[in-house]
Amino acid sequence: MNREFSFIILTFNEEIHLPRLLESIKDLHAEVFILDSGSTDNTLKIAADYGATVKSNAFVNHPKQWDFALNNFEVKTPWSIGLDADQVVTPELFEMLQQFRDEDYASINGIYFNRKNYFQGSWIRYGGYYPIYLLKMFRTGIGYSDLNENMDHRFIVPGKTMIWKKGHILEENLKENDIDFWFKKHEKYSDLIAQEEIERMQKLRIQTLKPSIWGNPDEKKASLKRFWWKLPLGLRPYLYYGYRMVFQFGILDNKTARKFHYIQGLWFRKLVDKKITRLRNP
């Protein structure tokens, strides 16, 4: 059994994704913990077949679900790796993890992985979607879930972090091949984000991280979010979409990826702003 790290995975009806992920990590011989939120398909059977330890918890949002996972599994390794069920570890990242030794990272508390995001079979290469560094590996008991977020999930660690630019996690939600699934999911997401922004306006939520354009990837994102919240509702989706397509070269992506930029970068942002306006003026 791997003595360096363990995996923690969230699931809900992931029979289409979970085998893909577990196959990509099984030869690391690390313990796998799965927190499920009421799957009705073969997810739990697949988890059992791979020898994972499984718990269940009702889903509220991703930050709270991760908080439950980090506080309710008995992870005995010095490091934990938190992955989403629709992600896959590439062979290059697998090799880096295979060579990982805790003693080589004595001064480090967290490691960012590089992500490649796919939509309906197409890599979203431009529009600010690559590279994207996600804090996925952290010291057990030190990394925690940011509960000041209602929608965007992130792990936080105090102390020093580093970025692994080589090796990737590939993320592709195969359920989104059905575009109706994508729209229904983002209808729910828009409710969470709109409510979060209202609560921030009311000073009921604060940013856990100190925003810094020169900081780590999450501190940079926190700085951009602070700027985003100051932009005019209704106008900011067009500013963002234009910036994403022109200055971040989204226009160079293929037709499928450009469709993603439109629905995620403009349609979705407009929906959020409409819901914020509705909440402010009931």
Image (cartoon, helix red, strand yellow):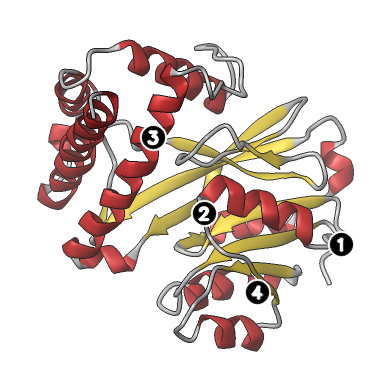
Closer to the eye: label 3 or 1: 3
**Circle 2 residue:** 60
Closer to the eye: label 3 or 4: 3
Q: Amino acid at mark 2?
A: Val
Q: Secondary structure under badge 4?
A: helix
Q: Earlier in the sequence, mark 1 or mark 2?
A: 1
Q: Name the residue: 36% across, 17% down.
A: 229
Q: Name the residue: 14% across, 23% down.
A: 238
Note whether residue 31 is visible: yes
Q: Amino acid at mark 3?
A: Gln
Q: Quadrant of residue 26?
A: bottom right
Q: Is residue 130 left or right of residue 146?
A: left
Q: Amino acid at mark 4?
A: Lys
Residue extending farthest to the front is 282
Closer to the eye: label 1 or 2: 2
Q: Secondary structure under badge 2?
A: loop
The label on residue 26 is 4
Q: CA distance from mark 3 to mark 4?
A: 39 Å
Note whether residue 100 is visible: no
Q: Position of residue 78 (x, y in %)?
A: 86, 50
**Circle 3 residue:** 195
Q: Residues within 10 Å of mark 1 (few under 14, many from 20)?
A: some
Q: Earlier in the sequence, mark 3 or mark 1?
A: 1
Q: Secondary structure under badge 1?
A: loop
Q: Position of residue 170 (x, y in %)?
A: 44, 56
Q: Residues within 10 Å of mark 4 (few under 14, many from 20)?
A: few
**Circle 1 residue:** 3
Q: Are marks 4 and 2 in contact (CB under 8 Å)?
A: no
Q: Earlier in the sequence, mark 2 or mark 3?
A: 2
**In which quadrant will I find the N terminus?**
bottom right
Residue situated in front as seen by the camera: 104 or 44 = 44
